[in-house]
Image (tube, helix red, strand yellow):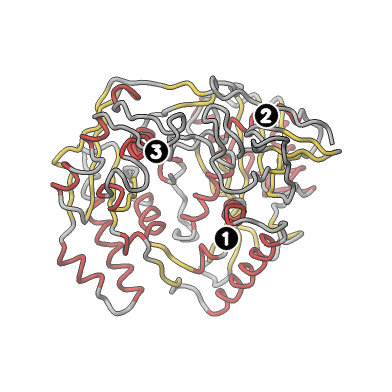
Amino acid sequence: MRRASNHVASWRSTARLTKWLHRTSFASVSSVPQRTFNSRGIGSPRLNGVAIAREKSARRYRDWPGARQVFGATFVADDRFIRPLDDDRLNLAFHRAAPSERFDELLDLFDSRIQGLFGDTRPDCIIVCLPDELADLRISNPKLSAKECEILERLQREEEQEQMSLFQPTPEEMKAAEELRTTAEDSLFRTFYRALKARIMTHQNPVPIQVIRRETFLRPDEEGQSFATRAWNLATSLFYKAGHEPWRPGDLLGNTCFIGISFHHLKRREGDVVYASVAQAFSNDVEPFALKGSLVPHNQRRDRQPYLTESQSASLMADVLDKYKDRAGMLPGRVVVHKTSTYQPEEEAGFRSVAESKVSACELMWMRSTAFRLIRKGMQEPWRGTLCSVGEESYLFTSGYVAWWDEYPGPHIPAPLEIGSCGKTDIRERARELLALTKMNWNSSEGLGRFPITISFARRVGMLMTELSENQIPNPSYRFYM
């Protein structure tokens, strides 16, 4: 084993903070009374004010200096945009005997209140505050036939067996593995959170929503995350959903389009279950966007993994490049494709045939969970950013000890991702790019994800696609999936 190369990227200087001097208005659709939202917890007064972090790690958990200091922005909860739900209607819907009727009536109730905010004068983002019993609401999918349930349950067993094939996987690794693949459970069950997000994005000219549990507002400062930490995370997410970017990686080459390819279970009207292919694109030059590709029969698999034919791969690549050109005004100079399984010959041929006819360079990268572990001498875990090579195999630690926090934010030995390419490449440079893309999580101020945005975006798109009909096109904007 060659000595691990330390820290394929320096993260003190990779993010550049963008600031605006402006007002960001947001709305509230909630079962929480208006006075509660405005005067307690972390509503707009808390986001615009100062809060002290009470966690032990002062380097990781910083005091909140206020939105103007961080983003050059002011968050405004305009009284015109506050929409409390009627308690009587909410209670009546909760007490419907049939689970599917209860689910749909509650969904319609929230949807109607949110749609009322889509007028000419509208907020930049809508906060939807849910009580725990609604945030956790989940029912069996009533639209599935017995045959479809049987297919999905078989696929679910295969997915679970594949997860357990890792060497003694920890709960964190099991959860991480789910983020890398299709999940049959997403189709077997409906969750209120997922159904609401999907419903809102199907409306014409919708506003992004931020779904929050009631306790996020009402939980005392000394319980769980402090007000300061909650303010950092909420403000970062709201700022992005309101149309701005808190940060971008500073060391990614411009004019490069990174594309994540993924597959997700989809029920067709004909009564069978297929995979829907999806491409997620990210670049420093355009906002992240998603595109729905070809439908793939559930038996079009090798090594239990779905794949694209040559024509399907070529069509998906052409669509991504066309949409990139529409947004950027020009084609990218380079394309990098990310996938969570190795490339089949048909996929390589299809992607390259289109990309190489339109752009200067095309690289095909894959990544997957692994049983590989690395132990360092001393007390510290492997550093995040460590690239380790063992023969022809390469392992990238996207989790691990974080130097500027002076801690490892995890309970178990860090698990790396195995990374590789289809064709020759500079694996060190590809690892540097992958690590930069793991920082593009605007749902949290920490910005340290396990997977690059190209893959984590895929999981979010797939979860919501299970709520869409076969002919519905998912909203391309990343703002609707966070």
* Quadrant in the rendering for residue 480: top left
Residue 37 disc label: none
Residue 183 disc label: 1
Tell which circle, 3 or 2, labels the residue nearer the N-terminal end: 3
Percent across and percent down for residue 399 are 61, 39
Percent across and percent down for residue 342 are 75, 48
The Cα atoms of the two marked residues, 3 and 1, are separated by 35 Å
| Nearest to the observer: residue 190 or residue 39 | 39
On screen, 150 above or below 4? below
The kind of secondary structure element at disc 1 is: loop
* Quadrant in the rendering for residue 357: top right
Percent across and percent down for residue 328 are 51, 26
Is 283 left or right of 378, judged from the image as shown?
left
Residue 358 disc label: 2
Q: Quadrant of the C terminus?
A: top left
Is 264 left or right of 243, judged from the image as shown?
right
The Cα atoms of the two marked residues, 1 and 2, are separated by 34 Å
| Amino acid beneath label 2 | Lys
On screen, 213 above or below 239? below
The kind of secondary structure element at disc 3 is: loop
The Cα atoms of the two marked residues, 3 and 2, are separated by 51 Å
Rate crowding at label 1 as few (under 14), some (14 to 19) or many (20 or more) other CA atoms within 10 Å: many
Tell which circle, 3 or 1, labels the residue nearer the N-terminal end: 3
Tell which circle, 1 or 2, labels the residue nearer the N-terminal end: 1
Rate crowding at label 3 as few (under 14), some (14 to 19) or many (20 or more) other CA atoms within 10 Å: some
Residue 55 disc label: 3
